[in-house]
Structure formats: structure tokens, C-alpha cells
Image: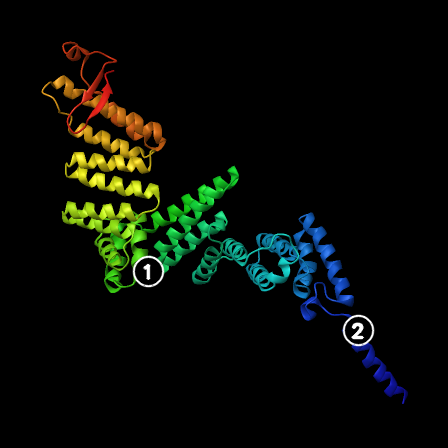
Amino acid sequence: MKMKMFTMLCALTLGATATFAQKGVEDGSRFGHGEDSVRCLKNISIYTEYVKTDNFKDAYQPWKAVFTEAPTAQVSTYTNGTKILRALIAASKDAAQQKVYMDELMAVYDQRIKYLDQLNTLVKKPTTKGSILGLQVHDYLNYCGKIDVNKAYAMSKEAIDSEKENSEYYALQEFMDISSRKLKADETHKEQFIQDYLTAANYADAAYKAATSEKDKQLLKLAKDNVDAYFINSGAASCENLQAIYGPKVEQNKTNLDYLKQVINVMQLLKCTEEEAYFVASEAAHAIEPTAATAVGCGYMYFKKGDIDKSISYFDQAIELEQDPEKKADNCYSAAVILFSKKQLSRAKQYANKALSYNPNYGEAYILIAQMYASSPNWNNEPALNKCTYFAVIDKLQRAKSVDPSVAEKANELIRTYATHTPKDEDLFFLGLKKGTSVTIGGWIGETTTIR
């Protein structure tokens, strides 16, 4: 009888202890309950002190206990966990042990994502899954030795697609790094690689424009340069490659507007508007849904075919359909260049001036007008007066660099060239002209300039 009662008492005691002591991972609580919660809090205190002194070796075991038993105790379980494991990987000389730490490092990120909703309730500024994935990819590349490119690419792409222009600078450049590695292993990745470049470059540009600190701007500028470098060094950046990729697919997708738009955007951004795939995609898309972009494509196509009037009619459509003033200006400028190439100077000048009406700071448009004037300086029977045309040329070039510093070097070089064609003082003297006198250039130019 006594033995039976003792057995029952032991069972009740064990049951009470089990109820009193329970880990957070088991009951969903933050620290656990009873003895387990006491142990959890003690381990947090111990490993945190070790981390403060960079004693990561002794921090490891108490940290791991918290990580395993109380996954929602603190966000710092994960931020400190990555510090600890990175240090241990770097310090270890044993490959097998390094592999253990590497796997645990990846598990830190996986578990943080798993419990992200609960962990975000503990902080004022929530963390996104995309930002965690970006960090995970960063550590995967830097600490995990030989990587699985497909696994890294999937994580990196998900991070970038999630964060977009909010992506960290390192996430953007590492996305291109991984995509380029995937391209080396798989030629069929070429089309996606090009799209990845455009995505990363656009987000890097947007992030740079939105950055407020000089440090962030420098890091994002570096990231953009690295993104560009991966693309340039990939060998996929040529228009010939784009034609090879898109040529057959455009023919198969002439009714797929989304695909046609993608081809048009890619080939415009990479300045491959002389390729047949671009023309075919533009004409097919324009037939379905006329837009400024498709009209531009058709305009270039008919220019290449030699039908200037039809080409300009499409550029007129592009100008009308476009809503962005700067892009309207670009379309006007393109029409002016085409007309200039066919020596239709008066019409070319009209479109260049139209470009300036949409974008008064369009330096290239002023340069184009200057080149038009220089290409046809003769308007008078008097050679010295014809040479005065070059003063009007220089006026436009001076204006170009004053409104648009980005063209200053080009404008200055042209000024040095055209300045040698201006009339000499003695030539003007016999015409009763001198420095400071105004001269109106006749003919289609119709500009008043000043002798100097």
C-alpha cells in the first residue's frame, strides 16, 4: 500500500513539474514558463555580457540554448546570433566544425523568418522578410564556401523583388553577382540575366535619388557601378546578343503585348534600337496598343527603311502620346537628328526648337542646332559674311553648356573647332564691320549674332 501511494505521488510531482517548467518553443510563450523561463533569462544575461566583450566562444552555448528553446524571446537573439556564428566560422580551423557553424548561421535566418510576425511585435520598426533574405544571401556568399548558385539566386531574387528600391546596396550588387554566376553555368539564363540587370540598375538609381546622407549616396553609387560592371563583363550586353535572344521570340509573341513591351523597353534602355527585333516588336505592339514607345520604334524602323516622311509621322505620334515633357523632348530631338541626316535643315531646326520648348535645359538640342548651322554656313555672296555664321554656331554652343553642364566638354571642343572658321578682322573692316557689331544671318538660319 505504501509503495502504491509513493508511486502515485511521484507521478503527480512529475506532472506538476512538467506543467510548471515549459520552454517557449513548446508553448508559444516568449521565455517559456517556470524553471525553463528562469534558465532562458539567465542564458540571455550570460551570452549578452559575453557578446559585449567579443567573447563569442563562451557566448555560443548560452545563446544557442535561447535560440533553440525560446525562438521569440528577443530580436537580438538573431542579430547577436549572426555575430557569434560569423566570428566562430572565422576563428575555426576545422572544416567540419566550420560547416556546422555555417549551417547554424543559415538556420538563424530561416528561424527569424519563421517567427517574423511575433518578433516584429517586440520592436518599434518592423523588419521585412526581404531585408532578412538580403542579409542571409550576404552571409551565404561570404561564409558558406562553395555555394549552390540556384539556391542563392532564388533567395536573392525574392529579396530584391520584395524590397525593390529599398534594397540595401550590397543586396543589389550581390544579386547581379549571383545572376552572372548563374549565366556562366546556364546559357539559357541570358534573357533573365538582362532583365535582372535592368531591375537592379533601376532600383539602384531610384535608391540613389532618394538617399539623403552622403554615405548612403556613396555606397549606392558604388553598388550601381558594380551592377553595371557585372553586366558589361558578362558578355551579354551587346545588341547582337539581344537580337539573337529576342528575334525568334518576338515572332512567336506578336500578340503578346506584355512581352512585346518588355522587349521594347530593354532594347531602348540598352540603345539597341537599330536591331530588327526592336522594329518588329514596336510595330506589333503599336498595332495592338499605340504608345509613345511603340511609335518611336516604328519611327526608327521606317527611318532605317528610308521612308523619312513615314518615320517622322511616327515620331509625331510619339510626341503626342508621351506625357513626360523630357521624353517628349527626346522624341523631338530624335526626329531632328533624322531630318538633319537627310539635310532637311529647316525642318530639323523646327524639331530641335520644339525639343527645347519641352526641355529648356536640353544641351544636346542646342549642339545639334549649332552643327546644322555649321553644316550650311553660306547665305550671302560675301564670304566674310558667310563666316559670320560661325558666331551664331558658337552662340548655340555657349548656350548648350550654360544650361546643361553635362555637355560642356563636347561644346568646348566644338567651340575650339568652329572658332577657327570665324572671319578675320581685316575681312570685316572692308565691310564696315567690327567687334561688337550685330549681324543677322539670313536664309533658313535667321539668327542675329554679334561679331567678336
The 10 Å Cα crowd at callout 1, few under 14, some 14 to 19, many 20 or more, is few
Name which residue lies at 41% across and 43% down.
225
Residue 419 in the image: state x and y as whole percent: 23, 21
Can I make out residue 236 in this image? no
Name which residue lies at 39% across and 54% down.
196
Q: Quadrant of the C terminus?
A: top left
Residue that numbered label 1 is attached to: 258
Q: Look at discs 2 and 1 and give the one toward the viewer.
A: 1
Name which residue lies at 86% across and 87% down.
4
Residue that numbered label 2 is attached to: 17
Give the quadrant of residue 69. Answer: bottom right
Q: Among all residues in the image, which is located at the extreme bottom?
A: 1
Image vertical order of residue 192 relative to residue 35, above or below: above
Q: Secondary structure at mark 1?
A: helix
Residue 22 in the image: state x and y as whole percent: 74, 70
Q: Secondary structure at mark 2?
A: helix
The 10 Å Cα crowd at callout 2, few under 14, some 14 to 19, many 20 or more, is few
Can I make out residue 86 in this image? yes
Rounded to the nearest angstrom, the CA distance separating label 2 from label 1 is 64 Å
* Residue 74 located left or right of residue 243: right
Residue 314 in the image: state x and y as whole percent: 22, 48
* Residue 371 located left or right of residue 189: left
The image's colour scheme reads rainbow
Ranked by sequence position, the earlier of labels 2 and 1 is 2
Residue 269 in the image: state x and y as whole percent: 32, 48
Q: Looking at the picture, which amino acid does disc 2 mark?
A: Thr
Relative depth, front residue between 243 and 377? 377
**Mark drawn on residue 445:** none
